[in-house]
Amino acid sequence: MHTHQDMEVKLFKGYGWKRCSLAQDRGPRSCLIKKGFILLLTLTFLLPAIIYFSDFSLKTTAPPGTLYKNVVNQIRSFYVAIEFPSGRDNQTIFLAPAPAPKTHQQVQQRATQISTQTTDISVHYHIAHPSNYHYILDEPDKCQQNPFLVLMVPVAPHQVEARNAIRSTWGNESTVQGKAVMTLFLVGLTGGSDSEKAQQQLEEESRQHGDLLQSNFVDSYFNLTIKTMVIMDWLATRCPQANFSMKVDSDMYLNMENLMTLLLAPNTPRQNYITGMVMWDRPVVRNKNSKWYVSEELYPEPKYPTYLLGMGYVFSNDLPEKIVEASKEIKPFNIEDAYVGACVKHVGITPSSPPDPSQFRAYLGQYKREDFLRVITTILGSPQQLIDIWKDVKRPT
């Protein structure tokens, strides 16, 4: 496999000094200019490598504030933490630590640049353990309200309409059957040419609503496992006092009354409990053309452990810390709900079927009000559909 850098080196060898020697008839100035240009290219490629290797020997002796430290920090501020698999030992290669929030635009520019330069590299193995990431937007004191239930919604940064629909429907219910409920949204880094503007809009939305969390992973479908583990980390570190939590996707209808009835039932465990739409004996997809493809290298077993479908599962709030700890031992793969199932299995917990499994539904088909009065959660087609159905379900009878 040849990387973009390999091609640049070959370009240097094939069109650098050799072409300079052939260009003598153009005069010495042309040759000197070309040599200077090639030297500049060489330094461009070698400087990060020199900094990287010298860092090991010098970082213990170079005092803070020196020219060396300043140069290293400047180099690092330009690189984003993109992970690539190592063919030798399948360990992740980090180009550099992720930058501080103030360098967000540089992060996105570099991420875009790297992704366009490495189209021949298959990215399979991302480190999902949340200690590898930090929060850009946070609400560390949110749980001082001692919520009984926390709803955590992973959502793409640009999906403002979905967030607003939730805020005006089930996410607006702060008290259900006398119990405090809180809803928070988690996003990753924005992408694209307008990423700086998008980030500013996110920050304004955060100031307005106080319900946005953002971490410094690239927000993509492939990174949903990272996103889920960051959710677990936030619950474990910022909100351990909650009784229950739920990971629920942004395109879901959620009947809060039915959910609370389930959680308050006397036979519902308060510890080591996770329930939802249970997936048993699900085969691992090995078709490389599928969005759900997982290689044998990442997950060698032919079937996943029992897990809960990622559209919405609820769990006792002692589990997030245990899942985060288990993730240190379980190699991450890109099917987030099955990965959580693997972590739960590692902890020694078996997912529970809900008392009425029909309350966790993938799709309900044609709209019938009585169906939505009965379920806990189901997938919808659009934010506007959520608003319309919510209004109808809540109308006086």
Image (cartoon, grey):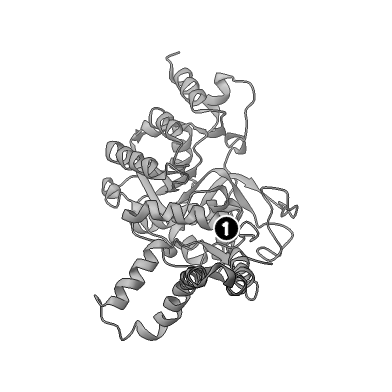
Q: Residue at x 52, y 34 (%)?
A: 252
Image position, residue 310 (x, y; %) = 57, 46
Q: Is residue 257 above or below residue 322?
A: above
Mark 1 residue crowding within 10 angstroms, few (<14) / some (14–19) / many (20+): few
Residue picked out by circle 1:
117
| Residue 365 placement, left or right of 209 | right
* Quadrant of residue 85 within the rendered picture: bottom right
Please state which amino acid type lies under the numbered disc 1: Gln
Residue 65 or residue 314, whichever sits in front: 65
Residue 70 or residue 154, whichever sits in front: 70
Q: How many marks?
A: 1
Question: Farthest residue in the top direction?
Answer: 397
Identify the secondary structure beneath mark 1.
helix
Residue 236 or residue 153, whichever sits in front: 153
Q: Residue at x 29, y 52 (%)?
A: 140
Residue 239 or residue 262, whichever sits in front: 239
